[in-house]
Amino acid sequence: MNLALTEMRRSKLRFGLLAGAVSLLVFLVLLLTTLSNALVNSITGALKGVDANVLVYSANARDNLQASRLDPAVVGQVAEVPGVTAAGPVSVLTTSAALKDGTEDLQVFGFEPGQPGAPTALSEGRLPENASEVAMDGGGYAIGDTLELTAADKQATVVGLLRGAQFNASPTAYLTEDLYGQIVKATNPNVPFVPVNAVAVSVDGDSEAVVSAITAEVPGTKAYDKDDAVSLIPGVASISQTFGILVGLTFIIGIVVIGFFFLILTVQKMKTFTLLRAVGAGTGRLSAVVALQIAVVVLLASAIAVLLTLLAVRGLNSGIPVELSPVLVIGTVAAVLAFSLLAGLLSIRRISKIDPFTAAGAR
């Protein structure tokens, strides 16, 4: 241990540059993963946070919530399927509103109070209970503010605030089906009835069996486990794949940098290691020197990277909630450390092949 730390103190510039390079790579991994999670959550948060186990769309919706249209009577039909404990409507539309943050596009989610389909990401206040109330995620609102629904010429008082419950990365309003129906009729006066986009279902027991039963017994519908419905939201798969490739490449580059740095360092110190072997230093002790240096560099670089990521996250003004997850930090640092130590086996392999007799010119 003393040998490893002594060398690092005497070569501050060399190890400092390596720690700086690794910290930037770990920073990119953390930042890209954080942004990816935030973007995906801003698109899927509304559906992910629905109080339901199963979601039912129209059969011709092509797995798209916004393309689904169902007669409100379907809610009662779904509720009668064996295994269903409760069912409630979920209605979605995009409308115009004079939002406090200056934007105009608003995602609207209608639900029936007391039934499945209500949001669960409430952070302050309460959920709306009548057609004059609304709960908001985004848009710059506080409890007690008034939401101006300009397209429908309606107003509603904000009684609750949600976090992580946006849909399509836009400010999202949660309101009762009564107010939702008024908005639809105000913007489409000739509509014969107000359709619902989905039926939210609570189940008792195996959700997969209920999914199959609903699809088979309720004509014109297709049921999904909620997690499956979330993963099928357009854009989610491509975003996850794109960011996954970027994060993977950055991670690999970081491990390669660490592995080759210590391999080159080991080659440069072969004479020193040979002499140490000749005076009795074992392969295990010299290998521990390399492993300790790798661990110190990675942990120091990770600490710098976490600080940089926190500063970057706080400085972002993206309009969507962005948070650095402690689980992500611990997992990333552990993965970088583990794979860096594996990359260090290249150096340890060279050390294990040292013949101490070459120090005395035996060959």
Image (spheres, rainbow, N blue to C red):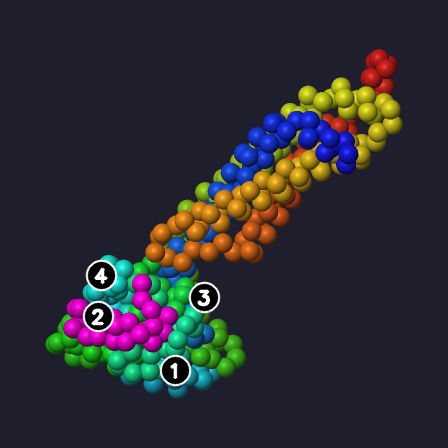
Residue 157, placed above or below residue 25: below
> Is residue 150 visible to us here?
yes
- Residue 181: image x %, image y %? 23, 78
Quadrant where the N terminus is found in the figure: top right
Foreground disc of the pair 3, 2: 2
- Checking the image for residue 227, the label placed there is 3
Cα separation between marks 3 and 4:
30 Å
Cα separation between marks 3 and 1:
19 Å
Mark 1 vs mark 2: which is more N-terminal?
1
Mark 4 vs mark 1: which is more N-terminal?
4
Please name the residue that numbered disc 2 is placed on.
148
Please name the residue that numbered disc 4 is placed on.
104
Viewer-closest of 178 and 18: 18
Span highlighted in magenta in the image: 140-161
Provide the secondary structure element on which disc 2 rests.
strand
Please name the residue that numbered disc 1 is placed on.
115
Cα separation between marks 1 and 2:
26 Å
Q: Quadrant of residue 102?
A: bottom left
**Lateral position of residue 11 relative to residue 237, left or right:** right
Mark 3 vs mark 4: which is more N-terminal?
4
Residue at x 44% of width, y 79% of height: 202
Cα separation between marks 3 and 2:
33 Å
Foreground disc of the pair 3, 1: 1
Foreground disc of the pair 4, 1: 4
Q: What residue type is labelled 1?
A: Gln
Within 10 Å of the Cα at label 3, are there few (<14), some (14-19), or many (20+) other Cα atoms? Answer: few
Mark 3 vs mark 1: which is more N-terminal?
1
